[in-house]
Image (tube, coloured by chain):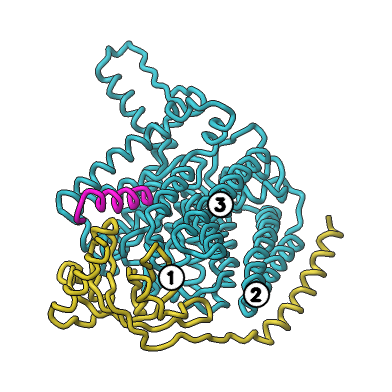
Amino acid sequence: MLIKPCLADHKVVGFYLGSILIGVGCVMIFPLLTALVFREWAVLFNYLLSGLFTVGGGLVLRLLCFTKKEIDWLHGLAIAALLWLAAAAVAALPFFLGGNYGSYLDAFFEAMNALATAGFSLARDLDHISAADNMWRHLLMFVGGQGIVVMALSFLMLHGSAGFKLYTGEAREERIVPNIISTARLILQISLVFLAAGTTTLTLILHWDGLSWTQAFWHGLWLFMSGFSTGGFAPHTQSILYYHSWRLELALLFFMFLGILNFRLHYAVYTGNRRELHRNIETVVLFFSFLLTFFLVCAGLLYFRVYPGLEAALRRGIFLLGSSHSTAGFTTIYTGQLFREWPQLSLLALMAAMAIGGSACSTAGGIKALRVGILFKALRQDIKRLLLPPSAVVAERYHHIKNYFLDDKVVRSAAIITLLYLVVFGLGALAGVCYGYPFLPALFESISAATNTGLSCGIITPGLPAGLKLIYLLEIWGGRLEFTAVLGLLAYGWACLKGK
Amino acid sequence: MRKIVLVCLLVVRVWAAPAAQERLSSELLALPRECDNIPTLYRGEVIGDILTRGEKVWFNVSDGENVIGIFAPRELAAEIQITGKYLRRGDTVKILGEFNRACSEHGGETDIHAVRIEKIAAGYALTQPVSKFKIVLSVVLALGVLVLGILDRKRR
């Protein structure tokens, strides 16, 4: 029998939502300080107002929904799903108040793209936005890349079992160490170490490439936050093309590569287990999928002579492929050039790369290398079963930090999530076609949205119909949470309506 | 010496060619093969930063629809004083140069190699006054948050 959630259940949802919203409001201190440094007084008040409103709203929720009731799995999923919507809603406030977005929906779209590390932008004039807005866009990506719940756990805003249920709801199933708070803190520590090293590297490169030290620092910081989080926002409309620098492209490729690796793998390598790099099922899948898609992208570019020589084809091809596979979405070509100049073979390879994405428990999106690896192993197991005598016991193993036997439960879970992604890719493409766009660009944009890549072929612009904006928003939100939390929220809503 | 000869050849090629046609970025990007390697006039606002690379510079010019990278000798860009940023409109320039759909010199980048840069309007600062309403609202909200914070602390 379906049990109808009571007032106490709603209070649990409201209480935890309020607690984390207070944290989101406090994070607005960073763009506020940036506005102070750059003397952007009008923008400063946008962040002050938005921060106070968010903290105030969070406190009201905490007071109204005060409860000591334990959180259960359905609460965890519902809170995680609602949290990402609520966080995007409040994060959009300073964008909307700044007036650089056509409507609140556009500002919300920007904030959701930043948090979910998608990277589509609906800013009207990105080249003239304030430094504080740029800080906020990129910081949201950094926070969203690690996970809002991970941040809340790191700063002790959530505890114990409640934290673990929310952590799982945020599409993070793996723990680096047994304790969930320690896991969250390790994720944050790894990211902060890379942030310091990455910002320094990018600052040096950008200064070498002609930016002043100050500009090089800010651009380096923002690009690292965006690149490592596999987000893909950049301070200018041209994305990475703005810098005209192969050195920067190379460095960003490396940081995107770091971003797609599992935090457990980072920790394993840090603790001396370097063999994990070539034994882990995820790195093996990523290596072969990158190799295959690289071959297809370059074959298309070279065969159809899109670029004047091998060097140009490799430079454009590798960067865009790296950007797609990592689901970052940085670009070094103009939006329209993808479908006007790139052959369909290369585009299909980019779509496949986006669909596979990065590792589980990383900042990347997509179906994830672990699931793809598990499904291949399951296929191999079934083929072996067909070939061997019926009495033979066929056991398949995979290595992911530890050795695991492939069981039906794991395969089923991987297959369901993969199927959900494929259905969403199809539905998103269908929606695009219904709005009058050709099939292939509609499919490209849909895959890019659901995998949180943000590489656009020109459909997602400020002039996009509101209905399609909402559909892409749903894809981005659902894709970031790997649909589980969204299904949990739907189940919660269904129980409210039909439960007894 | 080789660089000087190359620049001279480019200048001669651009000047000897039929009169350059002024084009919008949307035209250049929509018909890249038709516009490839031909003298082009392009007009727009200089945005962001001037990136110095030895004796050459890179800068980006927006015509309101797209932004195209311009590669030019340093002395040609010396006239550019103000670049577009937050609350600042950059100099408007008219560029004469060769449009490259996929520049072989710059790893396949779409760019314009400028041989003449003319500043047609100087950049200027913009103002954005702080709204008094926002200041008052911030104070009211701050007081409200303070009260709510005290209540929350008491409840805990």
Q: Which residue is mark 1?
A: B50
C-alpha distance separating marks 3 and 2: 27 Å
Residue A456 within the magenta-colored segment of the rendering: no
Question: Color of chain A here?
Answer: cyan
Residue A7 visible, this angle: no
Identified by mark 3, the residue type is Thr
Instruction: From the rendered image, report the letter of the chain displayed in yellow.
Output: B
Q: Chain of mark 1?
A: B
Q: Is residue B71 left or right of residue A408?
A: left
Labels 2 and 1 in the same subunit:
no
Report the front residue among A468 and A307: A307
Q: Which residues are magenta?
A: A307-324
- The residue where tag 3 is placed is A200
Q: Of the residues tagged 3 and 2, which is closer to the observer?
A: 3
Q: Residue at x 49, y 66 (%)?
A: A110
- Label 2 sits on residue: A44
